[in-house]
Image (tube, rainbow, N blue to C red):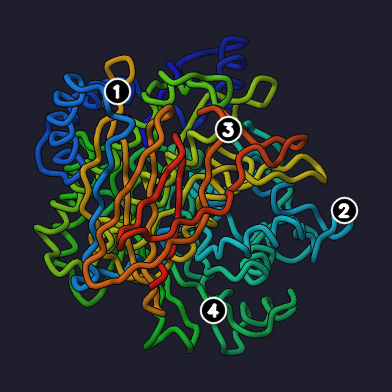
Amino acid sequence: MHKNVGYQSSANLAGPQKEQQMTQEIAFRPFRSIQCRILRQSQVRRTFLFAFQAGSPLVRSLFASLTLLVVATAVPVATAQKIQLSVDVSKPGPKIDRNIFGQFAEHLGHGVYEGIWVGPDSKIPNTRGIRNDVVAALKAIRVPNVRWPGGCFADEYHWRKGIGSPRAVTLNPNWGGVIEPNTFGTNEYMDFLDQIGAEAYLSVNVGSGTPQEASEWLEYLTTAQATTLAKERDANGHLAPYKVAFLGIGNESWDCGGNMTPDYYLSQLKIYSRFVRNFNPAQQDKQQMLKIAVGPGGGEPRWTEWTDAIMKAYQNHTWSWDMNGLSMHSYTVVKWPPSYTSVGFGETEYAQILKSTLEMNDLVEKHSAIMDKYDPQKKVALVVDEWGGWYAPLPGSTPGFLAQQNSLRDAVLAALNLNIFARHADRVRMANIAQMINVLQAMILTDKEKMVLTPTYYVYKMYVPFQDSTFVRATFDAGTFTHDGIMLPRIDAIAAKDKAGKLWLAITNVDPNQSAEIELSLVGINAKSAAGETLSASRVDSVNTFDAPNTVVPKPFSAKAQDGKLTLKLEPKSVTVVAIEQ
Ligand code: AHR
């Protein structure tokens, strides 16, 4: 993700000027490069060009709906028009990997400390220092994996400072320059994963660490043999080797991870891929650890060239190194520095943010096309391991903590992105929303002993049936919602069959004012009814707060077939997930 706050390096300054600049540097460490600002502006321009680029199904449906709009202006009956949605279950698509519902927890603001870790002596109910309310909430959304410890933090993290006792007290220069107590380290992370039932996605330090440091971390975690490091793990309370499902080799190595060129990064990737081994006996033949290389942070030539270089090297890789995934980072920001507010906005900002978020489709297709060139069998997954809405920090909060509220707009944004990932399930096999608790587009917000679940959390909960389901193509005319000259598809939908063979539909009504009637035609299914949940609220900026936690919560939703037809009536600005009963 490229970003800029008009930051100037302190390197050429002196005295008090340098000191003042360095304070800013601590708060805004990862935000740099004038070039990035230019890139961001061109991305905004591209937002408006998006509708005119042929190729993606979404755009094709937008074109079709423009025709509809012309008809609709002549005959003002748009509200009453039924939308035909047809699903043919006889043509199953790829598996929707449950890992696209992954999470990301960085040592940033209150993401880990307070959000997950309160310590064993806290009055907040906890299990070995990990708060119980958060664990229960995360279990309910069946988190498949958690990426940790960063983010930019990962490339300055030295794992030995976070094991045993006493722990070294260090700094977190990336995010506000605050104290890093290291009380949440490797064993605590693995304990947390165990409590919520998720897999480890460890990001190793390529920027300021060494291959040996990373390789010893993996030995400490995974060896079953009685090495000195395994004995240390045992002394720290865990005799059995841990499982590490995913290994991220660096983070944004083109920016906060060390400003590397593709060639320089490739040389690091090969070394880390070779020497950072997983020794767990259970992960040798089956369930092997998947290695994820740093990938692009946008759609401009700088990023397509990066993807091209890494994938070209992959095509020619020898026995001595390998990769199984290429990461991609893309936030919905619109304007840098993030100035859109997360609360108290209107329909214009709603439309602008959603328009921008739909660029994800274009980005996925652009990088997938490059990957197809070198990897037509799609062995390497596109891993969107940082995505989500990034808004202005909440007034009064520490700017480097990236604290923001989460509204109904974010629920719609989440559903639209999850749908894009599902439609590209053959290549996108993992994604991690940023970030899990108290940071950016979070699932959960906490304040000391209080906890509230966000609208985004509820989308993840409603989408649980799509985890490891089989994609089924849904065909529909999306229609158009236009506001202030911003055109958006009015409807978005995906369909999938779960392992038991049940058909699920997720339908988003983007239009904030008009309800939508969806007439289903299900080929190969005699549908009697549909039942599930719908998420909406009175305003696009409705949020859940500690005092009013139930403003945006799912409500039961059902529909019965009449005369052999199943019609779903969707509220404006809503996300609905239903199972079809036969
Ligand atoms: O999620 C916040 C930051 O955004 C991450 O640390 C970094 O990887 C990205 O730039």
Q: Amino acid at mark 2?
A: Ser
Which residue has dot 2 on it?
A: 122
Mark 4 element type: helix
C-alpha separation, residue under disc 3 versus residue under disc 4:
33 Å
Q: Earlier in the sequence, mark 3 or mark 2?
A: 2
Q: Nearer the viewer, mark 2 or mark 4?
A: 2
Left or right: 392 as drawn, with respect to 504: right
Residue 472 position in % (x across, y down): 26, 65
C-alpha separation, residue under disc 2 versus residue under disc 4:
31 Å
Q: Earlier in the sequence, mark 3 or mark 1?
A: 3
Q: Amino acid at mark 1?
A: Thr
Which residue has dot 4 on it?
A: 222
Let me know if residue 35 appears in the view: no
Q: Residue at x 34, y 70 (%)?
A: 497
* Mark 3 residue's CB less than 8 Å from ligand 1: yes
Which residue has dot 3 on it?
A: 402
Q: Nearer the viewer, residue 100 or 462?
A: 462
Mark 2 element type: loop
- Mark 4 neighbour density, 10 Å: few (under 14) some (14–19) many (20 or more): many
Q: Nearer the viewer, mark 1 or mark 2?
A: 1
Mark 1 element type: strand
Q: Residue furthest front?
A: 563
Q: Nearer the viewer, residue 153 or 489?
A: 489
Q: Earlier in the sequence, mark 1 or mark 4?
A: 4
Q: Residue at x 52, y 53 (%)?
A: 557
Left or right: 476 as drawn, with respect to 456: left
Residue 17 position in % (x across, y down): 57, 10
Q: Is residue 352 above or below residue 384?
A: above
Which residue has dot 1 on it?
A: 482
Q: Amino acid at mark 4?
A: Thr
Quarter of the C terminus within the rendering: bottom left
